[in-house]
Image (tube, rainbow, N blue to C red):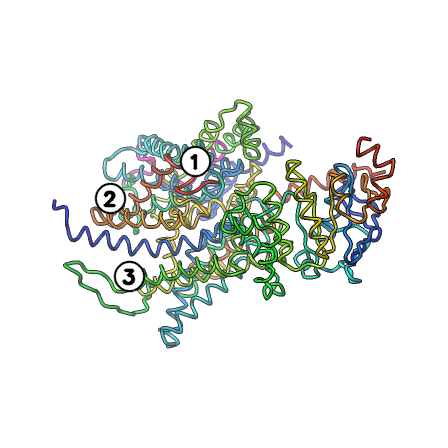
Amino acid sequence: MLQLANVSAGYGSFQALFEVSLEVNAGESVAVIGPNGAGKTTLLRVISKIIEMRSGTVTMEGRSLNDVAPHQVIALGIAQVPENRRLFPKLTVEENLKMGGFLPAARAHYGERLEFVYSLFPRMKERRAQRAGTLSGGEQQMCAIGRALMSGPKLLLLDEPSAGLAPVVVQSIFGLIKRICGEGYTVLIVEQNIRQVLKVVDRAYLLETGRIKTSGSSAALLASDEIRKAYLGL
Amino acid sequence: MQIFDVFLLEAVINGILLGGILALLALGLNLIFGVIDVVWICYAELIMLGMYSVYYLHNVYHWPLALALLACVLLVAALGALLHVLVIRPVLGAEPINQLLVTGGVLFFLQAVATLAFGVEFKNVGVSLPTLQVGGMYLSFARLIAFVVALGGMVAVYLFLKRTYIGTAIRAISQDRGIMPLMGVSANRIFVLTSALGGALAGLAACLLVLQYDIHPAIGLTFGPITFLVCVLGGLGNMVGGFIAAFIFAQFISVGGYFLALEWGYVLAFLFFIGMMFWRPQGLLGGK
Amino acid sequence: MNGARWIGLALLAAAPLAGMGDYPLHLLILCLLWAFVYTGWAIMGRLGMVSLGHGAFLGIGSYVVVMGWNHYHVSPWLGLPLALGLAALVGFVIGYPCFRFKIVGHYFALVTLALSEVVRLIIIALRDYTGGSLGVTPKTALVKATWSLGAMQFSSKLVWFYIILVVWLGGLWVWTRVDRSMARLALEAISQEEDAAASVGMNVTRLKLGVTLISALLTCLGGVLYAQYQLYVSPETVSGIGISLQMVFGAIAGGMFVRLGPTVGAVFTLLLAEGLRLTLGHDIHGLDTTLYGLMLVLFIIFMPKGILGAAIEAYEKRRRAPRVAPAA
């Protein structure tokens, strides 16, 4: 479904990604793991076209994203849950979800999708009229994920869903993510919390300083010495 | 002095009616600032052009008044959008002060163009609406209508911002511009739409003002600075604050003008404003 | 460079002696006078305190001395400190809340804009004294004499030229002093990062107020001289938004960040107005302001550093270019 081929990108004179290639197939859940500063967020920004890449191609269902403007990406079926949630603080939960469904094509399905999100996140239904800025971290994450789901995406991008959340909350978030993957969504997660994310996804790529070092199924990676020593402290 | 002085009451009521118009003016300006983060210093001049458009369409080209008024709103809405695209957008990335100055240049320009095109004689649409007599007070019907329409306009804007997708997007973009593309919203389109909406509000104000006042290229100066003060007093960008501040200001102008001469009413309002700046510099409801 | 400046100055000072006509001399005087006023504005403007209401100070200067002279026979020499005092007070009253509570940018500009309008309204409201919109002329002291020191009136343009020349130079000197003092460094830091500067223990408010007062006083002085030279003032020509924006435009068009920028701006605007008058005739009311407005917009968009600023930048770039070694 999504293919990155030799993508290089950066900021000004600083290059963050060096010829990164990866792919995500329909129905899969894939993670990009790696340490801080590896370029993971940059990767998602390139896919959402928030920053322009310097070379390489990104294709979604065979269609190149080269000439696509940033606000048109969601119409191709790619929705992102940005780092740090980025909810609209003064809008209510429901209004945030409504913004997620802003796409003209999504508006027809607003009612049913809203119900779906509320069924996934009952707490959001309770707090539907509450200002998003007053939610707890975990609730904000739920709201942000729900917002992305409102557009009925084919591919869901999650940028560091565990960032800034307490460990207990992280567990429940990943439980929810696992459920979403189970519902058949294609998911690409970028994450620092390797142990948690590998429990949830099928495959993963290891990104270090802008390059893909290794990749494989979650089980294989969890078992690999390299990962265990460097990242899991074993 | 009697406490219940009917002329004082008349001044107070006129103040309330004036407040309605000022609130409408402030709404447009606050909307633009709250969303795009720019102050249209030439806002009053857009209204001035709107007023001239009604005059020319109705009195010179003999369009029916209702049609001329509608055309005015649409015309100024278009001017607002044009202003954004031609003048504001090129300087969006520059220093904020440049954005301010560029609209100052437009103010200059529009006033001068109006002088060239329309001359300096006062013009009047010549629509004479009755004066109502209520218990010894004389209230202008035109002012009452203006008040009602202004309130109606504000309610319409409120509903638009609250209920529609675009309205919600307009509110959202002022809270987090960066992720708007992720929602499928082009920030530029929202800015142009907001500018058109601000222009439409100016056009509406022009319709209300043209029924009561003469038109002159420099009339923007009579309510422009006051509108700015109202917005600053209410907290720049805060629509509710501007609403409240408008009525307070209008009372100062009206009652002050009742006790002293008209110009002193404005001076008094300004002094009140300065006093408020010492006390609550960010404005009544401002918080940035 | 310095030598060239002295020569230029000497030439300028000697120019009228070489027999300029009265009218060109008049233009030159106005040029220098407005250059002084614009420079006074730019002292504040370049440090991020953009006032759209300096017309207030200009108006205070003009009207206080003329009213004092016409109604109370107070010599403009005494009226001057009165006007300066009032200008300083107004500057303080507006500046203090803004700076103390960190109201800058938009708020400040709007407040100053309203200020100039209020001053204009007050002048009009006091129409019994000021003649309202029709304007007023200082009562002449030159019926029998060609000059009167006490009335600050001189019929000789040559005398006025040298007075204004000295004042203009004085303005440039003040500009330089403000520029060089520690305050400038502090304020530049402040306009970028207020909290950081404050944490280093600088009294931001006092510095900003100081610069504001200097600017207000210079502008006020300009108003006094303008009234005494032109011998006619009206609310529109010396107060209100129009003249305030004109000051801003002049300083910006020339180059707000450069010492001689405002002067270049004054020359530019004056030549523009004169050029239009000559080519199109006196009757086209408001054509020059149309062009001012249009040009202000265009300058801000395309040449925010002004004519002189952009020229200097281009010069510096060309000077540096050959020395830059290509990246290895």
Bin the neighbour count of mark 1 within 10 Å (Cα to Cα): few under 14, some 14-19, many 20 and up.
many
Query: Which chain does the residue under circle 2 lie in?
Result: C
Bin the neighbour count of mark 2 within 10 Å (Cα to Cα): few under 14, some 14-19, many 20 and up.
some
Q: Which secondary structure, mark 3?
A: helix
Q: Earlier in the sequence, mark 2 or mark 1?
A: 1
Q: Position of residue C96 (x, y in %)?
A: 41, 32
Q: Nearer the viewer, mark 2 or mark 1?
A: 1
Q: Which secondary structure, mark 2?
A: helix
Q: Which residue is mark 3?
A: B143
Q: Position of residue A206 (x, y in %)?
A: 82, 42
Q: Are marks 3 and 1 on the same chain?
A: no
Quadrant of res C66: top left
Quarter placement of the N terminus of chain A: bottom right
Q: Which residue is mark 2?
A: C129
Q: For the magenta stretch, what is the residue range?
A: C144-170
Is residue A110 in view from this perspective?
yes
Disc 1 marks a residue whose amino acid type is Cys
Q: Nearer the viewer, residue C14 or B81?
A: B81
Q: Which residue is mark 1?
A: C98
